[in-house]
Image (cartoon, rainbow, N blue to C red):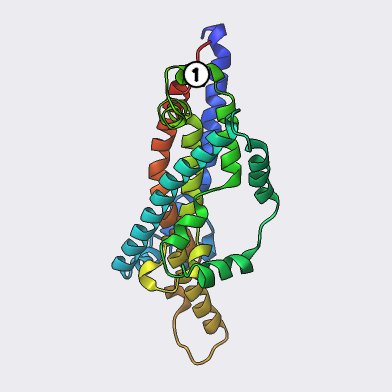
Amino acid sequence: MNIKKRPQYIINSISIVYSALCLLPFLLVLSASFTNEHALSANGFKLLPSEFDLTAYEYIFKSPEKILRSYGVTIFVTASTVVGGVLIMSMIGYTLARSNCKFARPLSFYVFFTLLFSGGMVPSYILMTQVLNWKNTYAVMIVPSLVYAFHVIMIRTFFQKLPPALFESAKIDGANEFVIFFRIALPLSVPVLTTVAFFTAMSKWNDWQTGLLYITQENMEPLQYMLYRIEQNIQSLLTALGQGGGITVDVRDIPGQNLLMAMAVVAAGPMLVVFPFFQKYFISGLTVGAVKG
């Protein structure tokens, strides 16, 4: 082995081991989701199912039209939030980063202030349900998530690091702020926009609290809230069985921990498929966004 290449081999070996350790918890969750509840309670978590069973998935997909509808709602809400949010937050960040913006400092403080203080859940609920009348609408699942103050600050900081000469030369050539933003600033900010898009997608995909607070119509339930409701129904049934009450059902026929693991797999599956594409564009974005000199 070449001595000069030895450090690189060591780094690669450490990276492979670390990646395998990061993958191990997901493999345990996947195996548990295919394990019989009684065997899971008796033998614990293993890399291979000790007693293969599809009861948990059969329970989740008992009504496939419902879960497909929830998937559709979640995909639509997530995609709309990512596209609209990245556009709006990038426009805000660009405005705050421009030196010719007279109110950049007070507006930056206004954005930062929202990171420290918020109105709370009760005022937000009153605003959404009684003032805006957004209960059981897509707007309540999309609009409040379009802007995250931390992401705005990330984008603003990235724009501030771009060479001012780019914008000045565009101004000399007669470009207005909209042309500069869409044709110069955005193409150079692919890395930060990709990162923000991924964070926004993850946050919105895993959001179940919005459905709990504002959605009562079954045909508008997002995926995470529907899975949460299934889990609550199972827990209520197990509690009722534990208290007796004349219910005669074999507890081993009711999914428990394996259901929770199956729900985690069902919820995380699409994002695991999407992540490599985000990673691909993130890496290419680093090249596109690089500034020479």
Location of residue 283 in the rendering, given as x and y in whole percent from the top left corner: 45, 27
- Specify few, some or many for label 1: CA neighbours under 10 Å numbering under 14, 14-19, or 20 or more: few
Residue nearest the observer in this picture, 73 or 248: 73
Name the residue at 46% across, 47% down.
Answer: 201
Q: Is residue 3 left or right of residue 179?
A: right
Number of disc labels:
1
**Element carrying mark 1:** helix
* Residue 241 appears in view: yes
Percent from the top left, x then y, of residue 19?
52, 35
Above/below status of 239 relative to 121: below
Q: Is residue 213 visible?
A: no
**Which residue is found at the position 48% from the left and 30% from the top?**
191
Q: What residue type is labelled 1?
A: Leu
Rendered location of residue 96, percent (x, y):
59, 36
- Residue 225 or residue 98, whichever sits in front: 98
Residue most toward the left?
65
Q: Mark 1 points at which residue?
A: 166
